Amino acid sequence: MSRLVCSTLWIAVIYCSYSAAAQTPPPNTPPANTRPPARAGRPPVPTRDPHTEGYVAAKELSDGAIPPASQDGNFIIGPTHPAAPEMTASDSVPHGTTFTFTMESTDSKFYPGIMRGPAPGEAAPPPAPGGGRTITTHAAPYTRKVTVYVPRQYVPGTAAPFLVGADGGAAWNSDTDLFTTLDNLIAAHKVPAMIAIAIGNGGGDSKGSERGLEYDTMSGRYAEFVEQEVLPRVEKEAKVKLTKDPDGRATMGGSSGGSAALAMAWYHTDLYHRVLTYSGTYVNQQWPENSETLHGAWEFHASLIPNSPVKPIRLWMEVGDRDLLISQDGYHDWVVANENMAKVLAAKGYHYQFVFAKNADHVDASVRRQTLPEALEYVWAGYPIAGK
């Protein structure tokens, strides 16, 4: 493990915008990789019916069943979510090795570090004109943890396929579950012997936070950060070689990490072709605003996918019937956003699988444990698997 000492701060930035935050703004000194609790006083999220008029037509499976990894399309699962057998560690299969290292914000040319709110000792800004919320940020250093899983089947010196995961190390996003699943799937020749890279976010949540800046920005910047600053460290620390073939690279994430996963592939199809998302934040969380994508990741289904040539992206995505709904502007319904994604992907002829989970919350842990093995197998379909 290597670690450098923080010694400098970035120049503070102040920006005004009407905020539609998904979670409570972080406290003044939030630990990285945590999700703040839901905002006090917000009404309970309604339970949505997957057969609601305007939603995509979907095949409803028997309770406890999951879709086959060989089929595209829309599926409804639940209301109970038994864990897949691949989620349980087994002594009968080879176990991969993990390596962990840290990265300091002071070493990053992409993300020197911000935090939501006024700097210590500074007064809060006045309300924005028209009653909107003023987003204020200040420079704040962070330490990012990266955990790398290397399967036992990896052959040193060869270029391996790999998966990049968002929110690595977060309590609600188990890296251990992912690595255990890969042990079992690789041994069964259901997925290639891939390396998995769980990258921690820079801290906080929502507009004005470092995590929000990294994940909710509609551009290729986060993919470029991973390519130029993270992957070289992975190869050095874990002593592996990563493939340059975009068909051998996948991205994965939940919530804003999900929309970030798609943005990595959308803006850099030269780098990634495979995407897996849980409760993807295909809504308007982008900050600072950008006139080219005025409604943030909502534009994926509103304009970008419908109006662009089909890209070489294979996508698995899930949403829960009790997923997030913030009704203040019409661009913050996670269920509608994911339903809309399924519509436009189907209309354009993409290979995708969409799972609507009943009795499921935002990035629901039980749904993830039920579906992750099948989701990984679906996403990696068509990639050569040694021994198969």
Image: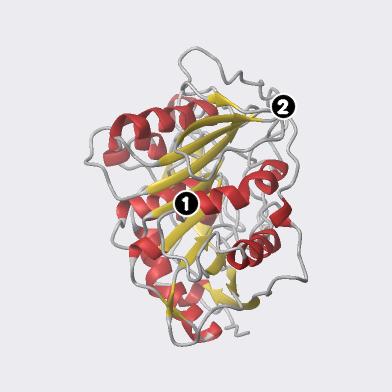
In this orientation, does residue 217 appear?
A: no
Q: Are marks 1 and 2 in contact (CB under 8 Å)?
A: no
* Quadrant position of residue 327: top right
**Residue under numbered circle 1:** 379
Marks 1/2: CA distance? 39 Å
Of residue 303 and residue 105, the one placed in the foreground of this image is 303
Residue occupying the point 28% across, 47% down: 311
Instruction: Tell me the amino acid under the disc marked 1.
Output: Val
**Label 2 secondary element:** loop
User: In this rendering, is residue 114 above or below 17?
Assistant: below
**Residue under numbered circle 2:** 41
Q: Quadrant of the N terminus?
A: bottom right
Residue occupying the point 23% across, 34% down: 307
**Among all residues in the image, which is located at the extreme front?**
388
Of residue 318 and residue 70, the one placed in the foreground of this image is 70
Expressed as whole percent of the image width and height from the top left, the position of residue 275 reads 45, 51
Expressed as whole percent of the image width and height from the top left, the position of residue 346 reads 36, 31
Question: Would residue 177 appear left or right of 9 to someone viewing this image?
Answer: right
Q: How crowded is mark 2: few (under 14 residues within 10 Å), some or many (20 or more)?
A: few
